[in-house]
Image: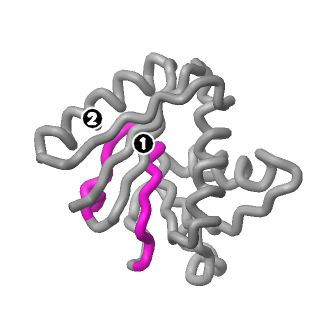
Amino acid sequence: MTQIDFYVLPDTTLEARITFACRLAETINHKGYRLHLHANDEAAASEIDAALWTFRPDSFVPHALLGSAEEEHAPITIGYSEPPCPGAEVLLNLADEVPGWFSRFERIAEIINQHQQVLVAKRKSWKMYKERGYPVKAHHLKGQA
């Protein structure tokens, strides 16, 4: 059964959430897992793409946007509407809604911070996972930004 992890940040900015998502993506990549980052829309996917290039000057996180020529070989993909090609084991859901195809992944990571829009959306996600019987775990982090 898919394991769900919620990472709860003390920060209030959306930028802190994106920065943590980049660090988490880097960690998942270093552990050898294929990852898909799911965004709300094309603009959000582009923002995540740009952040993965710049969040740390000494880091390279190989990734590609869905639909690009690099998608097939990238261990990390970024999209906003369609599911990724088979093979990704982890979903990092940065969208407000849980995608209907979430159960194809072994693990799902959701990032909550103290921004009101994020709190409202992720409370709904937590409730949906619990109602469907998925194991949900919260990780309360301190000073991660």
Name the quadrant containing residue 3: bottom left
Q: Quadrant of the C terminus?
A: top right
Kind of residue sitting beneath label 1:
Glu
* Secondary structure beneath label 1: strand
Determine if residue 40 is in view: no
- Give yes or no for contact between labels 2 and 1 (Cβ–Cβ under 8 Å): yes
Chain part drawn in magenta: 87-103
Residue marked by disc 2: 126
Up/down of 13 relative to 41, above or below = above
Q: Position of residue 72 (x, y in %)?
A: 56, 82
Q: Position of residue 7 (x, y in %)?
A: 46, 36
Up/down of 32 relative to 36, above or below = below
The disc at residue 129 is none
| Residue 125 within the magenta-colored segment of the rendering | no
| Residue 98 within the magenta-colored segment of the rendering | yes
Kind of residue sitting beneath label 2:
Trp
Give the residue at x 55% y 66%.
Answer: 77
Task: Describe residue 137's horizontal placement relative to residue 39 as left or right.
Answer: left
Name the quadrant containing residue 69: bottom right
Residue marked by disc 1: 110
Packing grade of label 1 (10 A; few <14, some 14-19, many >=20) is many
